[in-house]
Image (tube, grey):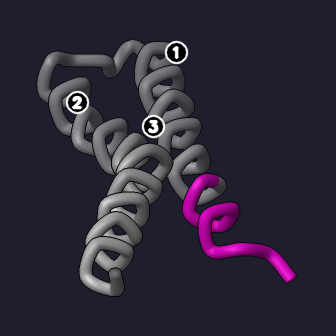
C-alpha cells in the first residue's frame, strides 16, 4: 500500500514538472510572455507546498498531540 506522503510528494512533483513543461512549450512556440510566466508561478508554489508543507504540518501536529498526551 502506498503511503499518503508518497502520493502527496508524487502529486507535488507532477505539478512542478507540468509547470516546467508548460513554460518550455510556450517558449518553444514563441508565446512566452510575462503574463504566462506569472500565471504559472502559483503552480510551482502549489507543488512545493505539497512536497514540503505536508511533512511540516504533520510534524507540528505530532508535536501538539505528544505535548497534550503527556
Of the 4 image quadrants, the one containing the N terminus is bottom right
Q: Is residue 53 above or below residue 67?
A: above
Separation of marks 2 and 3 at Cα, in angstroms: 11 Å
Q: Nearer the viewer, mark 3 or mark 1?
A: 3
Residue hosting label 2: 36
- Which sits earlier in the primary sequence, circle 2 or circle 1? 1
Residue hosting label 3: 19
| Label placed on residue 28 | 1
The residue located at (65%, 67%) in the rendering is 7
Residue 45 percent location from the top left of the image: 29, 40
Q: Is residue 16 above or below residue 10?
A: above
How many neighbours does mark 2 have within 10 angstroms: few (below 14), some (14-19), or many (20 or more)?
few
* Magenta-drawn segment: 1-9
State left or right for residue 58 relative to residue 10. left
Residue 55 percent location from the top left of the image: 46, 55
State left or right for residue 66 relative to residue 20. left
Amino acid at each position: 500500500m502506498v503511503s499518503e506522503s508518497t502520493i502527496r510528494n508524487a502529486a507535488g512533483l507532477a505539478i512542478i514538472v507540468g509547470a516546467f513543461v508548460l513554460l518550455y512549450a510556450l517558449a518553444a512556440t514563441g508565446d512566452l510572455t510575462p503574463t504566462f510566466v506569472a500565471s504559472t508561478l502559483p503552480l510551482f508554489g502549489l507543488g512545493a507546498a505539497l512536497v514540503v508543507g505536508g511533512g511540516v504540518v504533520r510534524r507540528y501536529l505530532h508535536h501538539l498531540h505528544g505535548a497534550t498526551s503527556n
